[in-house]
Image (cartoon, rainbow, N blue to C red):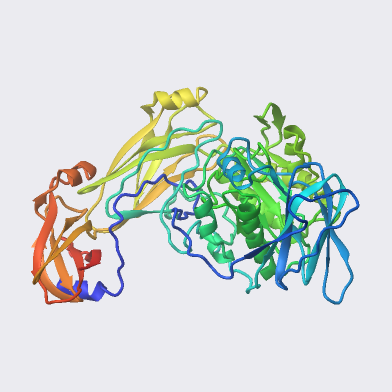
C-alpha cells in the first residue's frame, strides 16, 4: 500500500475538501464558483484617466474640452463628470494624420443597479460628490479624444480610456461544460428553485464523493434531459481579471430566482472580430467596475455577431445572479446584451440563433414560462422584454436595444413559447448523507401540473428503484398551495464499497418532461485533514483525522518526509467533532504521530489508506 501511495503521489492533489455546502443543479451542466475562482487571464485591460477640463471649470453648450492623447490600443472610452444629469455630449476622436470626427453622442448611462442594492451602495461610495458616468463608446485606432457639449453643463469632466492588446478568439468550453470560476474544475452548485417562491437552502453533505451533472443511461429516465446548454465562453476563457470584482465586492454575487429576461445592446462597434469581441467584453467589465463603480459586469450574458456567447457576471450561468443592467429590474431578471449597435442594423442571424439557443436552455433550467406574463414593479410585463420596456416603467428612459434590436423580440418570443418545455417537475435536494453501506437523499419534488405525489427514480450505477415523493411537507404546501404538501422524500439506498454514480429523477405526471433532481459520485478513497504540525529538535509531530467512507473502522495513515515513507500510524484517537459531522462513523478517526527528522526544513505529506484497497488519499502536505 505504501508503494501505491508512491505511485499516486505525482498524480493526486489534495482531496480533503470534506465539507462542501452544495445544492444540486437541475440542469445537465455543473459549474464551480468560489470567491477565489478564476485565475486572472491575460491580456488585462489598462485604464487611463485624463482631465477634460481644469478642476472647477464648467463646459457649457457649444464648448470643446481638452483633447488628451490615448494609447494606440484603446478600444473603449467613457466620461465622468459632476452635476448635470441631463447633459448631452458628443465624443470626438482623431488619429495623428486624420481629422476630428464624431464617434458617438452620450449622456448619463441609462441602465444600472437596483436602488439599495449592493452595487448601488458600492458605486455611491466610489463615485462620491455626485460623480456621474456615461455609457462606454467604442473607438479603434485613434490618438486623441475630446468632447463637445451639445446641451447642458459639464463640470470636472474626465476621460476614461480602456486599452488592451487583442488575443486569439477565446475557445468556448462546449455544451454543458461552462466553468463559472476556474475553468475545468467541476463541483456542484446551485439548484434552481421554482419560480414565484424562494425557499431557504439547506447544507448538503456527502462523504468521499462529488456531485456530477450528467444523467445515467436508463430506460425510465431517457427523456429527462433538458435542452442542451449552448457553448458558453467562460470568464476565465475571455480573460476576466477576477481581482477587480473581488476587490470591489469581496462577499461575492447575490442571487434570486429569475422570472423574466431583459434584452440589451451594448451600443458599441458592429465591426469587432471574434477576438475583439472578447476584448470588448473585458473592457465593458473593467468599465463597470472601475468607471461606474459596480461590483462586476452588468450583464449576465453577452452575445457577439458570430454567435459567441460570453458568461457575464460571476456566480454561475444556470443561477439567478443579480446583475446591474436595468435600473430596478435586475433582481429577478436575466440580462443579455447583444454586442454592437442595433439602432438601425438588424442583429445578424448567428447572433439571433445564439440568443434563441441560450434562452431556450436558460428559461428551461430556471423554470421561466415564456407564455405567462410577470407581475412585477407595479406592472405586468412579458417574460421577454427589451431594456426600453423596463426603462418605461422605472423612469430610466432608454432606446436600448435599438429599434432594429427591439424588432427581433416578437420572433424570439414566438420561438420560446413553442420550444421551452412547460410542466417540468420542480424539486430541491436538501440532504445527501453517506454512511457505511448506504447513501441517504432527502428533499422534495412536485409536478406543477398536479397536486398528486410524483415518482422518484433512483439509480445506483445502472440499477434503478422507484420511490414516491409523498411525505408531508407543510413548508412546501405553504409555498405552493395549489399543489399541496405531500411532496417530500427521504430515500436510503444501499451501496457496496468503492465508487458509484447515483442519480435521482423526478418523473412528470403532466405534460412536461422528467427532470434530473441531482447526482452524486461516491468514491472509496479515504477523506480527512492534515490539521497540525509541530517541530522540536530531531522530531516533527503531525495531527489530524481521516476515515474510509466505506466503513466505521479506523484506518491507517502513512507519513512521508521529503517524498520518502517514514512511518504508519492509526487514526484511532476519539474525535467527537468528526463524529458529529459524519453521522454513523463513530469517533475513533483522529491521529497524531511523531517522526524523526534531520536538521533544516522538511516537507511532510500524509496519506489515508483505504480499508478496501481503494486508492490512498493525500490528506495534505506541510513544511516544518
Task: Using the rendered view, name the quadrant where residue 339 is placed.
Answer: bottom right
Identify which residue, 491 or 507, lies in the foreground.
491
Quadrant in which the C terminus is drawn:
bottom left
**Residue 181 location in percent, x, y?**
48, 58
Residue displayed at 35% across by 41% down: 203
Decide which of 120, 556 is in the foreground and name it: 120
Total residue callouts: 0
Q: Residue at x 66, y 46 (%)?
A: 325
User: Residue at coordinates 66% horizontally, 36% vertically from top-left?
Assistant: 328
Q: Is residue 566 left or right of residue 381?
A: left
In-image side of 359 versus 403 (left or right): left
**x and y percentages locating residue 330 in the rendered image:** 63, 40
Q: Is residue 605 above or below residue 479?
A: below
Residue ID at (48%, 46%): 26
Residue 21 in view (yes/no): yes
Q: Is residue 136 visible?
A: no
Image vertical order of residue 5 relative to residue 521, above or below: below
Question: x%, y% of residue 474?
Answer: 40, 23
User: Of 395 and 527, which appears nearest the observer?
Assistant: 395
Displayed quadrant of residue 100: bottom right
In the shown orientation, is residue 335 left or right of residue 144?
left
Amino acid at each position: 500500500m505504501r508503494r501505491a501511495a508512491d505511485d499516486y503521489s505525482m498524480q493526486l492533489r489534495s482531496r480533503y475538501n470534506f465539507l462542501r455546502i452544495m445544492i444540486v443543479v437541475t440542469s445537465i451542466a455543473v459549474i464551480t464558483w468560489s470567491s477565489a475562482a478564476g485565475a486572472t487571464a491575460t491580456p488585462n485591460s489598462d485604464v487611463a484617466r485624463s482631465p477634460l477640463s481644469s478642476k472647477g471649470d464648467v463646459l457649457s453648450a457649444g464648448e470643446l474640452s481638452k483633447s488628451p492623447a490615448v494609447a494606440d490600443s484603446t478600444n473603449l472610452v467613457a466620461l465622468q463628470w459632476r452635476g448635470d444629469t441631463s447633459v448631452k455630449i458628443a465624443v470626438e476622436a482623431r488619429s495623428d494624420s486624420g481629422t476630428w470626427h464624431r464617434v458617438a453622442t452620450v449622456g448619463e448611462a441609462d441602465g444600472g443597479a437596483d436602488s439599495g442594492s449592493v452595487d448601488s451602495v458600492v458605486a455611491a461610495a466610489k463615485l462620491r460628490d455626485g460623480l456621474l458616468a456615461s455609457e462606454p463608446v467604442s473607438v479603434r485606432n485613434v490618438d486623441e479624444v475630446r468632447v463637445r457639449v451639445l446641451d447642458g453643463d459639464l463640470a470636472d469632466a474626465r476621460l476614461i480610456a480602456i486599452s488592451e492588446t487583442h488575443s486569439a478568439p477565446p475557445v468556448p468550453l462546449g455544451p454543458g461544460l461552462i466553468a463559472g470560476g476556474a475553468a475545468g474544475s467541476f463541483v456542484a452548485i446551485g439548484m434552481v428553485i421554482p419560480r414565484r417562491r424562494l425557499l431557504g437552502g439547506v447544507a448538503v453533505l456527502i462523504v468521499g464523493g462529488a456531485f456530477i451533472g450528467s444523467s445515467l443511461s436508463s430506460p425510465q429516465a431517457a427523456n429527462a434531459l433538458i435542452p442542451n446548454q449552448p457553448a458558453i465562453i467562460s470568464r476565465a476563457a475571455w480573460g476576466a481579471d477576477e481581482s477587480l470584482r473581488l476587490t470591489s465586492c469581496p462577499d461575492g454575487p447575490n442571487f434570486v430566482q429569475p422570472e423574466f429576461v431583459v434584452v440589451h445592446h451594448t451600443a458599441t462597434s458592429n465591426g469587432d472580430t471574434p477576438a475583439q469581441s472578447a476584448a470588448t467584453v473585458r473592457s465593458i467589465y473593467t468599465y463597470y467596475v472601475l468607471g461606474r463603480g459596480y461590483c462586476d459586469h452588468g450583464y449576465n450574458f453577452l452575445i457577439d455577431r458570430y454567435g459567441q456567447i460570453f458568461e457575464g457576471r460571476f456566480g454561475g450561468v444556470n443561477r439567478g445572479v443579480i446583475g446591474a443592467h436595468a435600473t430596478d429590474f435586475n433582481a429577478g431578471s436575466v440580462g443579455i446584451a447583444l454586442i454592437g449597435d442595433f439602432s438601425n442594423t438588424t442583429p445578424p442571424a448567428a447572433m439571433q440563433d445564439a440568443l434563441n439557443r441560450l434562452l431556450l436552455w436558460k428559461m428551461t433550467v430556471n423554470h421561466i414560462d415564456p407564455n405567462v406574463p410577470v407581475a412585477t414593479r407595479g406592472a405586468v410585463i412579458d417574460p421577454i422584454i427589451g431594456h426600453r420596456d423596463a426603462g418605461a416603467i422605472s423612469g430610466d428612459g432608454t432606446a436600448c436595444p435599438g429599434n432594429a434590436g427591439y424588432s427581433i423580440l416578437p420572433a424570439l418570443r414566438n420561438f420560446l413559447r413553442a420550444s421551452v418545455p412547460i410542466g417540468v417537475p420542480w424539486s430541491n435536494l436538501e440532504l445527501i448523507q453517506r454512511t457505511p453501506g448506504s447513501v441517504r437523499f432527502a428533499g422534495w419534488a412536485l409536478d406543477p401540473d398536479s397536486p398528486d405525489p410524483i415518482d422518484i427514480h433512483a439509480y445506483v450505477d445502472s440499477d434503478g428503484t422507484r420511490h414516491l415523493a409523498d411525505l408531508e411537507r407543510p413548508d412546501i404546501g405553504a409555498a405552493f398551495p395549489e399543489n399541496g404538501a405531500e411532496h417530500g422524500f427521504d430515500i436510503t439506498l444501499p451501496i457496496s464499497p468503492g465508487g458509484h454514480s447515483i442519480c435521482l429523477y423526478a418523473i412528470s405526471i403532466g405534460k412536461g418532461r422528467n427532470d434530473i433532481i441531482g447526482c452524486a459520485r461516491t468514491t472509496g478513497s479515504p477523506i480527512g485533514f492534515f490539521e497540525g504540525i509541530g517541530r522540536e529538535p530531531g522530531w516533527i509531530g503531525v495531527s489530524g483525522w481521516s476515515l474510509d467512507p466505506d466503513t466505521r473502522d479506523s484506518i491507517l495513515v502513512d507519513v512521508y518526509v521529503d517524498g520518502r515513507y517514514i512511518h504508519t500510524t492509526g487514526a484511532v484517537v476519539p474525535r467527537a467533532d468528526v463524529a458529529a459531522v459524519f453521522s454513523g462513523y463513530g469517533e475513533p478517526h483522529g491521529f497524531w504521530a511523531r517522526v524523526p527528522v534531520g536538521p533544516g526544513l522538511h516537507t511532510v505529506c500524509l496519506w489515508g489508506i483505504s480499508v478496501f484497497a481503494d486508492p490512498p488519499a493525500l490528506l495534505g502536505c506541510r513544511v516544518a
